[in-house]
Image (cartoon, rainbow, N blue to C red):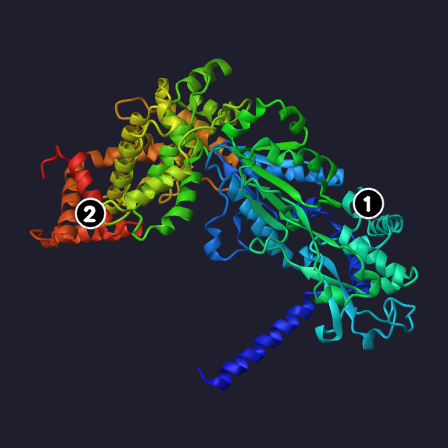
Amino acid sequence: MTVSRLLGELDELAGQVRREYAEQRRRLSFHEYLQLFASDPVRYSRDAARYVRDMFDFYGTNVVERPWGSAQGFRLFVLDFAPLRERQRALVGQEGAQAELYRVLNNLVREGRPNRLLLLHGPNGSAKSTVVACILRALEHYSTLDVGALYRFHWVFPKQEILRGTIGFGGRREDSLESRSYAHLSDHDLDARLVVTQRDHPLFLLPVPQRAALLTRAYREAGVEGQLPAWIEHGSLSLQNRQIYEGLLQGYDGSLLEVLRHVQVERYFVSRRYRTGAVSIGPQLSVDASERQLTADRSVAALPPSLQALSMFEAYGELVDATGGVIEFSDLLKRPLEAFKYLQTTVETGEVSLATQNIELNCVMLGSANEEQLMAFREHPEFQSFRGRLELVRMPYLLSWVDEQRIYDGQIAPQVRRHVAPHATEMAARFAVLTRLRRPDADSYSGKLGAVVGSLTALEKCDLYGPGTLPGRLDEESSSLLRAAIPLLYREFDVGCDYEGSNGASPREMRGVLLDAAQNAQYACLSPWAVLDELDALCQRTNEYAWLRESPGSGGYHDHAAFRAALREKLLDEVEDEFRMASGLVEEDQYAELLERYILHVSYWVKGEKLVHPLTRQQEPADESLMREVEALIFPGEDGRQFRQGVIGRIAGYTIERPDRPLDARQVFAPELARMRQAVFAQRREALARLCDGIWILLREEGSGLDDGARRRAQSATDRLKQMGYDEHCAADAARVLARERFADVHR
């Protein structure tokens, strides 16, 4: 790039920055700010609670379908406004906690001020910090938009030749605020510029009675219902600003217009890095707000005489930095009680007492605590006095392995410098969720449903909460009952401290498992087999984790050895199924087509009607031989007529639950499709075993000893496996394990 071109691009960039600076209205006079306020009174008079609530509304909601029903989440937690690298830190699940946060924010808005501390509580690693991090990141982005603009003010004092005398300088005064303001003077024309750290609202410069009347009238004319935020209606200037205001007012003989000429309104932006409106503090034993006296530097010496004699103090600290936004007290209850006892009155009154002043707070307070800390705090004598000032928001571990896997795929897999094999993160996610599940209480359910619920194993409940898969062993009536009862199952343990998801393996522990598995020297990728090996090693550390010390119960709950054995069988089933699809012995679409034909004929058979033959165009009864053929594949040696009766009911249930979606036979009848594959390939086990041998020889021994036909079949299957997410290393590993553990009895 030439120097002239570089300079040209620099000039273009400089022009763009100048235009954006003007468009963002970064610097205003008080008169200009009043015009801005008049254009949208609510937007420019929000307290922190309303600002954060409006931010939730701005990014909108999304509806997520879960096996236990529809759940509404807020899009700000998706972070789709952030750079791609930051989206990996998005929140997964926790729609219940999101709804609770929004409910509390709405209540704070109705009450007119943030007078509660929102305490997120749950087990370690349940995404409490992620929730707060998403909110703070969204605040940063929201404040850069016009709809989220935030303003503060400073004091500016021109040089003598510009001021031309007032307050000890002598000269005339203007009668109109609009006619002259010092807000837009350059630094060259200023003697002093006082920056006040507390970010008082510009409207605080108006006397309280007149301000309240102005706000009420502006809200009424804008058609806004509801009470004004107490902070903006009754709030007052901080001590430093009050001293400057009173000194100027005295020097100008009570002329408010002259005082306001010294006001420079500035737009500011929320920033986590610079602790502006977004502050997170750990459980250190420091004071969260303090004050210091301003020194007699050049800025103070250049002030008018009526201000130079003042002993001015400025407040500083985390509570001051968080003004207008959110402050997080991470692991709040790890502090000794005396270190945060001030919050008891601070949250109630909205003020913090310092040596020379009381600071009015305007920030949403969030805290986090794990369940052990909260349970200990409940036993403290002071808990009841704190309870009325807390809003408890529960954050359990996720109970859907599908959601859990999304966390690992988004946050852990990108850090692995190797190829991530299919099912690697799935094995970790399934195991984590299995450790969190509790055996349902059959006595809480009536009739046949109680027996069905009581028979659920941990593995079946895991699949019920994940993709919503019903146990294949159930008849149609039992399946319908269980499907309708999933919401009841999911909320069965909501009451009390020992809720489902309060204990179990943490995502942090699974992170270590996955990263260690990625370094396993036996595999060239992050292999699911390596993950299972690391889970075995993890479960040897019984002294480190409480969930490993729980006694196994009936149904396989809390049985970690059984979990690992079952997951290995599950992995073998899934890999074998993928190898069947990759083999090309039977095309996958043929199963679905056969099943769809079966459903069509069953629907006419149940109604006793005839259907039109696609070739002859003649009306014919349902094809009994076709139905028996399919039923023989799905239920070998059994009478499939009972299944026919339930087909229509299952389709009807799917349609009722998803009225806007077309029928997906592969989803509705997934267990039956799996049985069809197994039945078809039961007669082709030898061919599949030879294919596994061929893939291993092709990928590990460069095809040595394979004839042309076997080489082509192995290469074709490998290509299909690559489309499923395998690479050559994990395909070879899977072929070896299948050959050893599933086809050892097959004669090649």
Q: Can residue 520 be seen?
A: yes
| Label annotation for residue 732 | 2
Q: Quadrant of residue 338?
A: top right
Instruction: Look at label 1 and name its amino acid.
Output: His
Q: Is residue 578 above or below residue 37?
A: above
Q: In the image, 510: left or right of 313?
A: left
Front of the two marks 2 and 1: 1
Q: Earlier in the sequence, mark 2 or mark 1?
A: 1
Q: Which residue occupies the foreground of this view, 419 or 17?
A: 17
Disc 1 designates what residue? 234
Quarter occupied by residue 739: top left
Task: Measure the C-alpha gap from mark 2 to mark 1.
Answer: 72 Å
Amino acid type assigned to the residue bearing label 2 in the image:
Ala
Percent from the top left, x then y, of residue 502? 48, 28
Locate residue 174 relative to residue 141 in the image: left or right. right
Would residue 190 appear left or right of 78 to someone viewing this image?
right
| Residue located 68% across and 65% down the image | 24
Q: Identify whether 55 is placed above or below 385.
A: below
Residue drawn at x 67%, y 45% as measured from the top left: 363
In terms of secondary structure, where does tag 1 sit? helix
Local SS, label 2: helix
Q: Position of residue 685 (x, y in %)?
A: 17, 37
Q: Residues within 10 Å of mark 1 (few under 14, many from 20)?
A: some
Task: Where is residue 424? Give x, y as percent.
Answer: 32, 42
Q: Quadrant of residue 33?
A: bottom right
Q: Are marks 2 and 1 in contact (CB under 8 Å)?
A: no
For the residue pair 11 and 424, the one nearer the viewer reads as: 11
How would you rate the neighbour count of disc 2 (Cα within 10 Å): few for under 14, some for 14-19, many for 20 or more? many
